[in-house]
Amino acid sequence: LDVSMDTWSYFRTCLASIWLHRFYIYSALALGISLWIVTQFTTTKTKKKGEKSSGNPTSSKGTEDKLVNGCATPQAEEVYVAGVKIFYGSQTGTAKRFAKALAEAVTSLNLPVEVINMGDYDPDDCLAEETTSRSICVFLVATYTDGQPPESAAWFCKWLEEAANDFRVGKTHLKGLRYAVFGLGNSVYVDHYNTVGRRMDRWLWMLGASRVMTRAEGDCNVAQSRHGSIEGDFQAWKAKFLTRLQALCRGEKKPCSGKCKKGKCKSPGKQSKESSDHERGASEHENTEAEELFETSSEEEADAEEAGGTNSIIDVEDLGNIMGHMKKAKEGDVGRRENPGRKEEEEEEKREMITPALRDALTKQGYKLIGSHSGVKLCRWTKSMLRGRGGCYKHTFYGIESHRCMEATPSLACANKCVFCWRHHTNPVGTEWRWKMDQPELILQEAIENHQNMIRQFRGVSGVKAARFEEALTVKHCALSLVGEPIMYPQINRFVRLLHQHSISSFLVTNAQFPEEIRSLEPVTQLYVSVDASTRESLRRIDRPLFKDFWQRFLDSLKALAEKEQRTVYRLTLVKAWNVDELKAYAELISLGKPDFIEVKGVTYCGESSASSLTMANVPWHEEVVGFVQDLAELLPDYEIACEHEHSNCLLLAHTKVSSPG
């Protein structure tokens, strides 16, 4: 018992001593922990420096973990980028072509790459898998009619939209997915420019995915494109993406604009904060250069308005772009006020309408291109008449000799994208002239020379009549209806005068979207207005016009035609199941423009096109066209059927003042 008491007394004495000296004990522990932390930090730093100097971060075997073209080889212990998956949504094939080009470039970096058509991919089953795959997902998507996605990308976009706005889907559903978006569009369509690319970018961001770089936008409008064409925009973005991809392969989390001093980021705290937020909001430091290269002035306002109207979320990136472009616009206005001579410089800086890619496409179609915006092509009816066969409907209706007719245009651009376009929309579009302009003398001279050179290719060809061959070398008629909108050409009056001075008659066709230009147009031999539909809705569906006020422009164009003191023609193109049931509406439009002639023609099927849904089922039989014209004539007491060209599936109605003598 005495021993137990002594032990307990000793224990109490020790505890009391520890308690009295607790401050020294705590200090000693704190010092020890501090020394341990410093030791660990120093050791780690020294190790990293040694790895960096040896070029071997994970192994003593230098050959196993080398970077090839900036990307880690499969032997590396930690793979930052396992591969690249390129998704495309294309209507005319451009996005698909870009996807293949990007895939080739990525392959050169020794990275696995997969090109995927969005139409063949089910995002509901597969997209979430990309959050853990360590792959970079690239989305190349076009914006089509009325701001809608291409048919192949419709379901993909619909799923993304529904998931992003569904409260039952977590906002981190795609956390871990790393992506980049390149949109394809045309800034002429102000309300719908690159709408699909912008929305896809936002939906991915709302679902927690992380951008690896700022969204980029390619512009088919060469006058506004940052790099002169959509191909140039893509090439510039591709180079930047590959640089970013190499950085990701090295394990770098954030890109650098190159503006940091001594290689150190100016705002590490900001970077860290953004990194912890899955890189959602692109910082001012990040991708400043990309924004300057690719973002457009109209984009941000549309994005902010859309976000506020749908889910009241404004992406940090878009908010920054809004402020940046407002500042740029303000600086531009001040610069123009302070420097009036800038307008002349801008005129000199206008771009050519025909881009290299467009030139290649049109040349393959048989065009002989003239200067930077004009073209000529040999008509099949010209070839037919050279052989002593029949001519086109203009020969039957008006006596125009097809072998002496030159089909040309001084403007390849058009303000519509009609579903039955003969050229499958390879020509540019626009609502006003914004390109470099060639002089009419040059256009006419080269048009005639090119036409004659095409005729000379038939010298000695079996079946070609010698007399007609010699006649064909002298152009007597010019059909300004090849493609595009000739009335857009600012010097169209001078061009027409030159034709007449050379004893060449002129038939000019306009798409009824430029009423003021029709009024100011000097007399041509025969002035056409295309009347492709008789109601606002059907005209919008068939012609797909660029102008917001297309219907009013259409009506004003018909009124302007009525004011012309020359021969005028309505051209009606019948598309079965689209516009053949609007007889009364057509009759009202005819009373508005009071044309001398009305040509009614069945649509010509020009083969399958990704830019149009037309098939042979939309082409009316000749008997159906005849029936339509007969019914229309009953509603028009001042008109009567004058002629017919069955091969062209075409009939002519003529006003009685023209068809009846006296």
Image (spheres, helix red, strand yellow):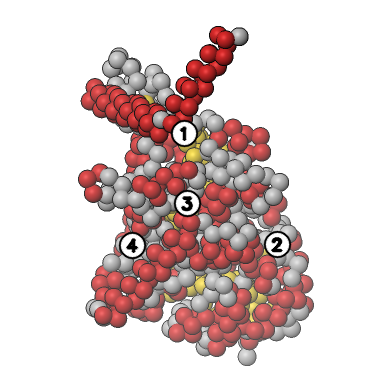
User: Of 327 and 155, which appears nearest the observer?
Assistant: 327
User: Of 306 and 483, which appears nearest the observer?
Assistant: 306
Check residue 352 in the rendering and tell me which mark sits there, or answer none: 4
Q: Nearer the viewer, mark 3 or mark 4?
A: 3
Q: Callout 2 environment at 10 Å: few (<14), some (14 to 19), or many (20+)?
A: some
Quick one: quadrant of the C terminus?
bottom right
Mark 1 vs 4, N-terminal side: 1
Q: Callout 3 environment at 10 Å: few (<14), some (14 to 19), or many (20+)?
A: many
Disc 3 marks a residue whose amino acid type is Gly
Check residue 578 in the rendering and tell me which mark sits there, or answer none: 2
**Residue receiving disc 1:** 84
Q: Is residue 141 left or right of residue 68?
A: right
- Can you name the residue that lies furthest to the bottom here? 662
Mark 2 vs 4, N-terminal side: 4
Q: Nearer the viewer, mark 3 or mark 2?
A: 3
**Residue receiving disc 3:** 281
Q: Nearer the viewer, mark 2 or mark 1?
A: 1
Mark 2 vs 1, N-terminal side: 1
Q: Callout 1 environment at 10 Å: few (<14), some (14 to 19), or many (20+)?
A: many
Q: Are marks 3 and 2 in contact (CB under 8 Å)?
A: no
Q: Is residue 616 visible?
A: no
Q: Are marks 1 and 4 in contact (CB under 8 Å)?
A: no
Q: Determine whether 337 is above or below 316 in the image.
A: below
Residue at screen point 65% across, 84% down: 592
Disc 2 marks a residue whose amino acid type is Trp
**CA separation in Å, label 1 and label 3:** 22 Å
Q: Callout 4 environment at 10 Å: few (<14), some (14 to 19), or many (20+)?
A: some
User: Of 555 and 502, which appears nearest the observer?
Assistant: 555
Q: Nearer the viewer, mark 2 or mark 4?
A: 4
Local secondary structure at mark 3: loop
Local secondary structure at mark 2: loop
**CA separation in Å, label 2 and label 1:** 43 Å
